[in-house]
Image: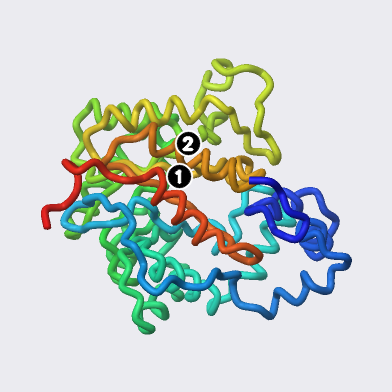
């Protein structure tokens, strides 16, 4: 898609903020406006939204335990300011995502057919309860890692599942303490909900599958950004990475390694950071290409989790369109009507 001076090109703002002196200046430059006053005015406007269709076409869906969820799951990193792009983008996200805008985010996702949301922590889920009070009926699951407070995490908003936090998974496996992750899975099941494991290191997921743990689903990061935690892992890759912007290191071939493992395991898997936390978002074409590659590389019973930042562009609508284009499920994997 050719770039238009007067049209924001998806998540290019995030890249701008990483290099700009202030969020206002970055927004102005990215939007192609003559001054920053228009960008500042966005603080008082609702999320950028396209005109809602009269009838929403259901998104392709997959089975997750007894639940049916859309193949596109709304992520939570932008809501919590986890930009992976540096301080400017992080602060901009935190400033934008007030409680009200978090609720609007879920409402917009649901209106466009997204039926599930993965949130970051039960200690930061007030917006979910508010959204439910306003009629949102999405399914929710949370990242977690402590065993002692699993009941508290479940009591918070009644998630359909808890997933062992990816960073914690990678660290425990690297330290030879993988049994703690297994104990977490068992404890979650003992509390009557789905138990998942997230990881950035594909070897963690492979080992769990090889050992036959009773895990309901996996979350796999397309980029092994915790590589430095694993002894010897950094020596196995080229010395120069291609997608580096912060202290995290992004190697372009990492998605191949993770999706190979995702295809091998029998459980549903959800790929996340399929857009490399904004690094694959130069323009709309690149974004759609990333979705196409993701869905062509995972199983028909798998999905993706994508965090969205609709401050200037309706990224929710654009991502939904990409899933309709590339995430259709073969007939044999569709629910019986």
Provide residue 7's location: percent of width, then percent of height: 71, 59
**Would you say the residues marked 1 and 2 are in contact, meaning their CB atoms lie under 8 Å apart?**
yes
| Res 149 seen here | no
Q: Residue furthest right?
A: 34
Q: Is residue 246 toward the left or the right of residue 185 in the image?
A: right
Q: Residue at x 50, y 61 (%)?
A: 316
Residue beneath disc 1: 272
Q: Is residue 265 toward the left or the right of residue 284 in the image?
A: left
Nearest the eye: 175 or 124: 124
Mark closest to the chain's N terminus, 1 or 2: 2
In this rendering, is residue 211 above or below 269? above
Q: Quadrant of residue 130?
A: bottom left
Q: Is residue 38 toward the left or the right of residue 289 in the image?
A: right
Provide residue 230's location: percent of width, then percent of height: 50, 27
Q: Residue at x 63, y 38 (%)?
A: 248
Q: Which mark identifies residue 245?
A: none
Nearest the eye: 100 or 179: 100
Q: Residue at x 74, y 57 (%)?
A: 88
In this rendering, is residue 41 above or below 28? below
| Res 28 seen here | yes
Question: Label 2 neighbourhood size at 10 Å, few (<14), some (14-19), many (20+)?
Answer: many
**Quadrant, the C terminus:** bottom left
In this rendering, is residue 94 above or below 189? below
Q: Is residue 157 toward the left or the right of residue 281 in the image?
A: left
Residue beneath disc 2: 222
């Amino acid at each position: 898609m050719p770039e238009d001076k007067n049209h924001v090109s998806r998540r290019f703002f995030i890249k701008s903020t990483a290099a700009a002196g202030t969020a206002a200046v970055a927004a102005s430059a990215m939007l192609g406006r003559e001054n920053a006053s228009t960008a500042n005015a966005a603080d008082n406007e609702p999320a950028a939204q396209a005109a809602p269709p009269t009838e929403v076409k259901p998104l392709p869906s997959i089975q997750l335990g007894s639940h049916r969820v859309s193949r596109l799951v709304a992520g939570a990193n932008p809501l919590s300011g986890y930009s992976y792009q540096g301080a400017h983008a992080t602060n901009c996200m935190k400033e934008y995502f007030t409680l009200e805008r978090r609720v609007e985010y879920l409402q917009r996702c649901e209106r466009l057919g997204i039926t599930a949301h993965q949130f970051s922590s039960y200690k930061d889920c007030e917006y979910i309860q508010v959204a439910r009070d306003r009629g949102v009926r999405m399914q929710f699951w949370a990242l977690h890692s402590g065993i002692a407070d699993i009941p508290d995490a479940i009591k918070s908003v009644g998630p359909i599942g808890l997933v062992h936090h990816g960073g914690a998974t990678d660290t425990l496996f690297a330290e030879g303490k993988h049994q703690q992750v297994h104990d977490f899975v068992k404890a979650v099941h003992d509390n009557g909900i789905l138990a998942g494991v997230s990881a950035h290191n594909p070897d963690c997921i492979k080992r769990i599958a090889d050992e036959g743990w009773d895990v309901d689903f996996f979350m796999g990061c397309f980029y092994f950004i915790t590589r430095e935690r694993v002894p010897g892992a950094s020596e196995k890759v080229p010395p120069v990475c291609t997608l580096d912007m912060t202290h995290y290191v992004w190697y372009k071939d990492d998605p191949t390694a993770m999706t190979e493992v995702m295809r091998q395991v029998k459980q549903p898997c959800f790929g996340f950071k399929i857009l490399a936390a904004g690094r694959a978002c130069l323009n709309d074409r690149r974004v759609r290409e990333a979705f196409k590659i993701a869905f062509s590389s995972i199983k028909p019973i798998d999905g993706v989790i994508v965090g969205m930042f609709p401050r200037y562009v309706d990224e929710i609508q654009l991502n939904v369109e990409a899933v309709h284009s590339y995430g259709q499920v073969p007939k044999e994997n569709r629910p019986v009507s």
